Amino acid sequence: MTPPSGDVVQGIAILLWAADPSVPERLATPFFHAAAAAALDVPVEIYFTAASVRLLVPGVAAGLHASAHHAKTIYDNMREAVAHGARLLACSDALDAHGIDGGQLIAECAGRGGAVQFMARVCEPGWKTLVF
């Protein structure tokens, strides 16, 4: 995929910062964008930080809907993004801050990725970023 500037996109790094399970109407969009980019064969990494790490706890995202008119759960949206190739990464500091055992996350979580990893991606010339 080549953007108008002529730079080759090597990947998309998505930071979930304000994507809080207490506001489920904000949660589907990041995963729609992740699935779309991954479906275009663009590598996608989704970094869960702040309260968004709670979405990686089994059962949390499965109980949330973006709206009463949307049949899929947020977990369904997450799984679709992963099925297209997106990688879900949990911030260790955010897990600790929320008292979440990092060994008890959903199977779709590919591992850890915090501020250093996200900033390394941001600094790579071919990577683009989105923040939700």
Image (cartoon, helix red, strand yellow):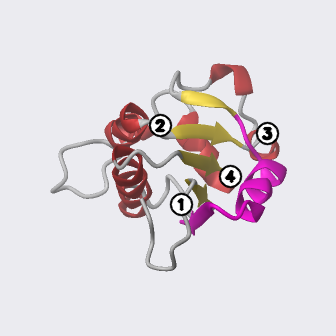
Where residue 27 sits, quadrant-wise, is bottom left
Residue 118: in magenta span: yes
C-alpha distance separating marks 4 and 3: 8 Å
Disc 2 residue type (three-letter): Val
Whole-percent x, y for residue 44 in the image: 52, 47
Q: Is residue 5 positioned above or below 71 on the image? A: below
Disc 4 residue type (three-letter): Thr
Q: Which marked residue is nearer to the observer: mark 4 or mark 2?
A: 4
Q: Is residue 83 positioned above or below 15 on the image? A: above
Q: State the residue position of label 2.
A: 60
Q: State the residue position of label 1.
A: 9
Sequence-wise, the earlier of marks 2 and 3 is 2
Name the residue at 54% across, 66% down. 132
Q: State the residue position of label 3.
A: 92
Whole-percent x, y for residue 106 in the image: 53, 25
Sequence-wise, the earlier of marks 1 and 2 is 1
> What is the secondary structure assignment of the residue under circle 4?
loop
Whole-percent x, y for residue 87 in the image: 55, 37
Q: Which marked residue is nearer to the observer: mark 3 or mark 1?
A: 1
Where residue 66 sits, quadrant-wise, is bottom left
- Closest to the observer: 85 or 68? 85
Q: Which quarter shows the N terminus?
A: bottom left
Query: Where are the magenta residues, as a range?
Result: 112-132
In the picture, measured across the screen, residue 44 lies left or right of residue 100, that is: left
Sequence-wise, the earlier of marks 4 and 1 is 1
Q: State the residue position of label 4.
A: 49
